[in-house]
Image (spheres, coloured by chain):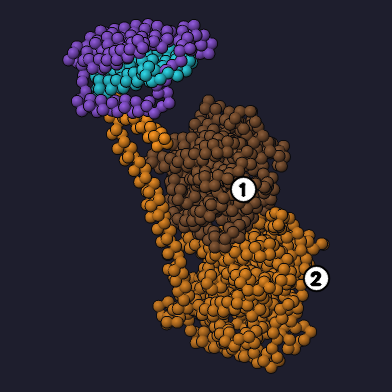
Amino acid sequence: MSLQIISIILGSLTLASALMVVLSKHPIRSVIYLVVTFFFITSMYIMMNAQFLAIVNMIVYAGAIMVLFLFVLMLLNLNKEMEPMNAKGAQIAAFIAGGSLFLVLITALKDTLILGQTYRQQDNSIGLVKELGNLLFTKYVVAFELTSILFIAAMVGAILLAKREKQIIE
Amino acid sequence: MAKDLTLLLLLALPLLGFAVNGLFGKRLPKIIVGSLATGLVFTAFLLATSLFSGLHGTQIVHLFNIIDFDQLQINASFQIDALSVWMTLIITGIGSLIHLFSMGYMSHDEGYHKFFTYLNLFIFSMLLLVLGSNYFVLFFGWEGVGMCSYLLISFHYNDAQKGLANSLAGRKAFIMNRIGDVGLLLALFMLLGQFNTLEFLKIGAAVQQNTALQGGAMFFITLSLFIAATGKSAQIPLFTWLPDAMAGPTPVSALIHAATMVTAGIYLTVRSNFLFELAPFTKDIMLYVGLATTLFAAFMALRQNDIKKVLAYSTVSQLGLMFVALGFGAYTVALFHVTTHAFFKALLFLGSGSVIHGMHEEQDIRKMGGLAKLMPVTHFTFLIGTMAISGIPLLSGFFSKDEIMAQALHHNTFVYVVLVLAVTMTAIYMFRLYFLTFHGAFRGGEALKSKVHESGLSMTLPLILLAVLSIFGGLLNLPGLFFKGAAHWFDHYLSHSTFGLSEVHNVHLDFNTSIGLMLFASAVAIGVMIWAYLNYAKKGALAKEDAALSGWERLSAQKLYIDEIYHAVFVRPLLAFSDFIGKVVDIQMLRNGIYALADGILYSANLTRKWQTGFLSSYLFWMIFGLITFIAYYILKLSVWH
Amino acid sequence: MALILLPLVFGIIAWFVPGNISRIFGLIASTVTLAWSIIAVSYFEPSEHLLVDFGLRFVRFSIDSLGFTMVLLTNSVFFLVFLSNFNTSIVHEKRFTALALLMQFGLLGLFTTNTILGFYIFWELTLLPIFLILYWFGAFDKPRALLQFFLYTLVGSLAMLLSIIGLMHLTNQQTYDALLAADIQSFGNTSIFLMGGFLLAFAVKIPLFPFHTWQAETYTKAPTAGTMLLSAIMLKMALFGLLKWVLPIFDGNATDFWRWPVITLGLVGIIYGAVIAIRQQNLKTLFAYASLSHLGLIAAALMLQNEHTNLISVVQIVNHSIVSIGLFLAAGIIEERLGTQQLDQLGGIAKVAPRFGFWFAVLTFVSLSVPFTAGFIGEFFLIKALFSAHTFTGILASTTLVLGAVYMLKAYQVPMFGPTKINSFQDLHWSELAVFAILSIAAIYLGLAPQCITDFVAHSLTQPTH
Amino acid sequence: MQAASSIGTSLDFFLFVSFALFTIGAIGAMTRKNMIVLLMCIELMLNAVNLMLVTFSTYYGNGDAQIFVFFTMVVAAAEATVGLSIIIMAYRNLKSIDIDMYNKLKN
């Protein structure tokens, strides 16, 4: 029962911080809220006993990626006047669209057969590092190795893109 | 020599001449080209004579299969019987004479070797036509002669003034012939459908075994055959090409457009006699078409001023006469007239050729006159030809025409009366032509007169030979009045070994009627001759200028305006139709329709392009919108199911 | 197999051959291919089917006597195209040589493939080279005309692709033999739609009556070599597809459904093309419409699915290739030497160039299908087949003989005869002379002995289909 | 199987959260014009999907889905790196990070 309460609280907090990401005017704040959101998501992973992912999420997302975002924001040194805002009508349309998407998704969920079912407690060891490691280095070993190439490509790409070029396209 | 070998050699010789002259003719001297062509055709004639003397019964010579499917076989095979051998004799005999004549006539022409090449090819095609043992080979020859005719009519295409007109005349001939060919083609299809073979003998046997074949099918088959015959033999309505075909060199007119090719229609009908016998209605059509043709053509010939045009209309008229005979079912009679006509018409054309040659390419009789002294041989032979065609007694034309008149009198008096009219007109225009050309004063000017000369031996020799034939040709088929033993030799000869003809018997009138008929015909012919002599030679009446013509004369000179009518009724609408669908339907409707479609797509693309605002948020919005619709659709589908 | 790949290899090499010897290279390449195929035919037993199977799913080739006929035809056509253009500037371009050889590869593949998807792939493969040839060497003043051709064919191909997908999906088969054995008839109306897709593609390519508008303009503006390729061999792909694939596979209710519509369109095309051709002033346009008329006849006769008619159709297909190479060559020669194709600006060529006059006349008569030429046999039996199927159809079809005489004689006489309107005209080059001679001999030989084709092809066409 | 009353640990709760996160991310992507925030919203949506994948993975007792989540993270990291460098590049050129300024592709 306490697990339920905890999860409800966690879920509400996740959503609240996610909302703050979108709503806050200043990008720095958005980043901070995003980090918070990731924390809560990590905690939800832990609740589902997906330990490996929880750690990775913590390190990669909340750690590496968000720091990257912060760096960029600081690099660009944006002030508040430059913060662009959408027109009101477009915002309302966006909210309506999002809302109806949500409604539709919920409706779809309502009709499915898995409604109200809980996950299987007996198999909850699959989220452990050992299990996933086994999978990762047997079945998905090729894909895993390929990710390294992807990273190299991304790295080279990022360096190339961010390098200050001589001529600046107007 | 075995018969089949003779036959193949007979066919191969003109082909050889064609090949040799076509390939090397340019480099060979003229005398070799000419004598080679002439010699080969003459050798072919000798071979034909050997076939003729050794003829007994019908023989088929099989060469090879053209198409061999399980049920359908079409062979290149040939048939030797009385009819085909007789036609071969005419073709090669007259052909070699005309070749000889051409050696002199064409001697100044730059296309000398080309001319003999075509001429040999023509002889070959014509031989195919008459010797083939089935309709398919006949059709080969049929189209082949049409092609040669086209080539030879438009032979002088380079001529500065008349070049285009010559080639247009050739085209007209080819197209008109093609219309007839379509008829033959359809007949062939129907025959194939009906009998599954095209062999004459097999069809004949099938017809004899199954007498229930009368009626519709036979009518359509024979009608199509007759359409083919009208095309090739220049009958109404397809006759207008023949006068125009006179644009070709004169020997060509003599060979193709008088003696041989135009009789192909007659040959076709005689060959298919067993079919026509089952279709009396077609025979009636043939009779009246022939009758109309002979009458109108004779009328048109009355006031022509071109020496060759007169002869051309005369040919059309004579061919009509032959169709009248065919219409009565008197096949041998028609063929008899084909033979005599070949003699005297070839003679007349060659004579006119000699005149034209001597007059340095002048064809207008208004510029001639008094040529009798300048060209004695030509004059004399031309006179014989004129007398033969007009039916002066005891010459060949007299007998052959008389046979036809006898048939007409026996079957249908009305036809007889019309024929008398036509025959009278024939005599009138022929004597008019003769007297205007050879008598009176020379009207071509002194400069020309000094240059007029008699033709050389190569041209006069054929004239003399043909004149002899024109005189004595009638002996082939004497009426059974006096020499009972020798009479009707030709009838017997043909019906002896030609399929179907032994079934058909010509009527023979009783003695008194026959005598009366002959006397009447002789009287008419001689009377016309005397009148023409008085009118043209004594009184010196001349051909009138165009402006001075009276009503009926104008009609005759303008050929009853048939060309103009055809032009207005067929040619102009076809061209207009072509313009219409070419410009309006094809370009404006179809192509521009496609373009309009393309424009429409372009336009709609421009419209949809406006959606691509370039604002990421709007794309996202639409994406979400699509997602919603998509999921909503599945939800609805699910809820409908439940 | 090497037979098919040979042109591809040559085509690739051709890119690296220097421009000044590219015409010799093209000639040699096509000669080698032709020689090879002739040798292959002489070792080929007509009653057998050669099957080349690598065990790959969609790569499977088979060749029977019909395929061999078409392969020989293709190789001969390419040989003649290279030979006939030996004296023109286009073959100096290595791009042309390479593209033409690539196209030859596509055509050979099409005629020998045994899988339906392969058929589609090769079908499309031939389109690219010809499009580039037209684009680079054609005289299209507006890109629209060229695009019209391209898009037209693409739309047709798209329909065919849909049909192929449908067919593979329904039967779960993709080789020729398996499709032949499959019971298409059980699909009912679906098979009618499937066949319709194929027919649309073919109707564009052949072309049949309402889908022909690309033809005249493309033929007129294309370089002569391109027109020859298009008309002499590319259009034959559709007839081949009809004969070999579609009609046997869809034998049954689908064919019964489409038979008379297609025959009607063919018939309309016969008369329509001929009538339009009468008034055309441009030589190539005139021949284009004539082609419409001739091919309509073949397409209509093929739909009858009569065994003998099919055999004769092959003869007529070969004949049409002969005719179109010859006529477009003649038109090309006139255009190249005088810079115009308008009939009213031409006249009296025969006087200046008698050899050209003679050979053009021969080809004209071949196309008029006078006896002793292949066209005569072809037209005679095809019209006969139509006549037996439906009398009126046959009568209408036979009008092509008369109308054909009208426009062909016009096309020949006006430029060649009549008053001389031209100053100088260089007579035939030896290569052009050779092409004309080869064509004429072939036409006459086939006219006298069509049996050599029909017997050969009969081995692959007379097998009972269902 | 447990009853629906145990709402906290039930499957649909996590799915609900996942959907909501996704929606929030989508709304953010539509409303915000700051490119960096846009990128963040995309990360948010990715996380929503990750969450859903993990949920189902645990439910079915199958580890494959978690591996996919791992790969998603890898790709997200790469994407963020490249995306941010593009943003820097773009900022240098136009001195703005307003997404609506970047509609050069339109014409």
> Amino acid type of disc 2?
His
Which residue is denoted by mark 2 in the rendering? B56
Colour of chain C in the rendered structure image: brown
Of residues B315 and B279, the one drawn nearer to the viewer in this rendering = B279
> Amino acid type of disc 1?
Val
Of residues C175 and A127, the one drawn nearer to the viewer in this rendering = A127
Q: Residue at x 61, y 60 (%)?
A: C388
Label 2: how many Cα within 10 Å (few below 14, some 14–19, many 20+): few
Q: Are marks 2 and 1 on the same chain?
A: no
The kind of secondary structure element at disc 2 is loop
List x then y, in percent, for residue C291.
51, 50
Disc 2 to disc 1: CB gap under 8 Å: no
Please identify the residue farthest to the right as the structure is shown: B1
Chain drawn cyan, letter? D
Q: Residue at x 34, y 43 (%)?
A: B600
Quarter of the figure with residue A153: top left
**In the image, is residue B385 above or below residue C444?**
below
The kind of secondary structure element at disc 1 is helix
Q: Which mark is residue C292?
A: none
Which residue is denoted by mark 1 in the rendering? C314
**In the image, is residue C136 above or below residue B446?**
above
Colour of chain B in the rendered structure image: orange
Chain for numbered disc 1: C
Q: Quadrant of the C terminus of chain D?
A: top left
Q: Quadrant of the N terminus of chain D?
A: top left
List x then y, in percent, for residue C40.
68, 36
Chain drawn purple, letter? A
Chain for numbered disc 2: B
List x then y, in percent, for residue B176.
53, 65
Q: Residue at x 69, y 62 (%)?
A: B197
